């Protein structure tokens, strides 16, 4: 192994760190990888730290001591967060998105890598210093969000299902009441997918009455796990009492006109809830 | 905007390119972003290109001319591909993975960001110079794979569903025969999610008789779209005639012993099919 130049180290180090968010990387690892002195690696990391901070890519945290190293914590900048939420409100307000029952067509947005990347960064920023062991969602449309958040937090995600499939092995199921339809439904999660004591973050694409999210909350209790928080991409218009009150939404569907088949979407409570955090990141 | 130092440019450029695979970035964009001469940017990009090639991160392609720029094409190295496939064969061969009906428990692996990242890189490498407009999969367990591949190819993904949900708008449906159970089933895709003429890559988690994949193939025809290829994470043991013969699998479940409740997994046909490509990338 030949000694690697600083420019080369910076490029490879950047990629390495970006691919391993929230993972502690010992300085000795980089020192060996590039056959370079620890002092040079420290200097490299100081540059990476500064650029990541300036460009609001994230925080490069230093953990001192023998078992120390660096840890990359992805974040989103305040302006970028605002711009994305504004853009999404406009996209949701486009004609023809309104579906029967007050639902909103989101499959195009939630199938676009760029959109998912930003959703992941936003939600991961909110929970950057919370202890999260797993991200939970319900099939089908919450999955892309769970996957993106899990990538930025570097924790696994688990998928709760409404249908019984034979390919999951033993499951634990709960009944829950759909707040929108007042029907009793069933959801289940593979028994081995969530260890007891796990700290679980619930995410979903769209929340109306909160029945589904409430079902996941019951499931978390069944698994003797702990709820860390609830984040949804969009919250719909709901006239009754929500079953869930403590949640974060990126977007809020404000006005729905079923006759004209239009809706108007605005920012959800994310920005207000995370104002201080986003501001502090800006320094 | 003040002029940005080379070291800073390299770090931010690396991140920028990694986040936008397969996207043409004009040199003038970087030139403005860092308030630096185009000649300096060209030199930067030559360094990035070399490091990306050496570390088998991907190809930094140069598109010459006024409308030109650079494009980052993620790839996986041959050794890394082999190591990952070997590791996955071992993971799949672990005790207790075998489920009734010859299915394999995969939810833990397909809920792990690291695993999904590598699956995405592997499949994206195979199709790096194919024209792919969309990745298609069927709910639920194919979704994480589709999302990861779509991220590395920078194209949207679409989700075919077996259940009728009201929140998708109008759909197009097809009937298909499940090769394993010989039952006739139905799958559907939201009408607006796939434009006619799209070039579609099918991915899924697990293939036995190929009935589901065959259903997606019919659906692609219904949408007047074109099939680019079929890639699955794992192929199961299937005694009858497969409905699909032209596919790629990363892993192959070779021997299943339902009495002892064990299975033995080996490499699928991916490495053999992509030998030349992976070798060429190595230079």
Image (cartoon, coloured by chain):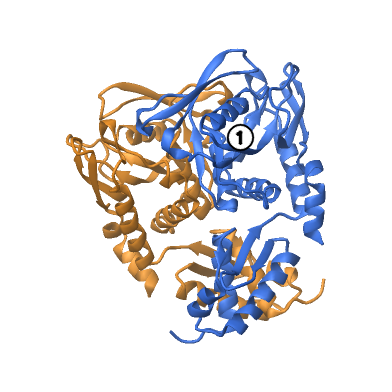
Chain colours: A orange, B blue
Q: In this view, does B45 lie above or below A150?
A: below
Residue A52 x/y as whole percent: 50, 72
Q: Is residue A168 above or below residue B193?
A: above
Q: Considering the numbered disc 1 on the image, is that residue within a helix, a strand or a loop?
A: strand
Residue B246 x/y as whole percent: 72, 32
Chain identifier of the residue bearing label 1 in the image? B
- Left or right, B185 with respect to B44, comes to left
Name the image quarter holding residue B225.
Answer: top right
The residue sitting at 62% across, 84% down in the picture is B39
Q: In this view, does A214 lie above or below A276?
A: above
Question: What residue would you read off at disc 1?
Answer: B204
Camera-side residue: A36 or A266?
A: A266
Q: How many marks?
A: 1
- Left or right, A163 with respect to A232, comes to right
Residue B22 x/y as whole percent: 59, 58
Residue A159 x/y as whole percent: 48, 35
| Residue A64, visible in the rendered structure | no
The quarter of the picture where the N terminus of chain B appears is bottom left
- Left or right, B28 with respect to A105, comes to right
The quarter of the picture where the C terminus of chain B appears is bottom right
Q: In this view, does A137 lie above or below A59?
A: above
Camera-side residue: A167 or B52?
A: B52
| Residue B215, visible in the rendered structure | yes
For mark 1, does the 10 Å Cα neighbourhood hold few (<14), some (14 to 19), or many (20 or more) residues?
many
The residue sitting at 17% across, 34% down in the picture is A240
Name the image quarter holding residue A283.
Answer: bottom left
The residue sitting at 56% across, 47% down in the picture is B150
């Amino acid at each position: 192994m030949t000694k690697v130049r600083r420019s080369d180290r910076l490029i490879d180090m950047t990629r390495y760190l970006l691919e391993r968010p929230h993972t502690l990387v010992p300085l000795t690892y980089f020192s060996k990888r590039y056959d370079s002195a620890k002092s040079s690696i420290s200097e490299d990391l100081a540059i990476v730290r500064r650029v990541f901070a300036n460009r609001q890519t994230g925080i490069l945290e230093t953990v001192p001591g023998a078992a120390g190293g660096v840890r990359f914590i992805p974040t989103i900048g305040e302006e970028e967060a605002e711009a994305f939420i504004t853009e999404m409100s406009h996209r949701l307000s486009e004609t023809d998105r309104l579906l029967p029952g007050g639902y909103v067509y989101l499959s195009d947005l939630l199938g676009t890598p760029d959109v998912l990347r930003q959703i992941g960064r936003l939600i991961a920023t909110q929970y950057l210093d919370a202890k999260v062991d797993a991200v939970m969602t319900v099939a089908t449309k919450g999955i892309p969000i769970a996957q993106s958040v899990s990538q930025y937090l570097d924790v696994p995600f688990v998928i709760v299902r409404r249908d019984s499939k034979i390919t999951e092995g033993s499951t634990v199921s709960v009944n829950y009441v759909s707040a929108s339809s007042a029907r009793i439904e069933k959801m289940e999660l593979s028994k081995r997918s969530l260890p007891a004591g796990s700290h679980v973050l619930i995410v979903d694409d769209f929340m109306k009455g909160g029945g589904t999210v409430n079902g996941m909350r019951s499931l978390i209790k069944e698994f003797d796990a702990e709820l860390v928080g609830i984040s949804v991409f969009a919250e719909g218009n709901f006239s009754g009492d929500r079953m869930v009150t403590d949640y974060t939404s990126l977007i809020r569907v404000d006005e729905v006109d079923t006759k004209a088949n239009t809706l108007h979407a605005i920012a959800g409570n994310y920005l207000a809830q995370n104002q201080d955090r986003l501001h502090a990141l800006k320094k």
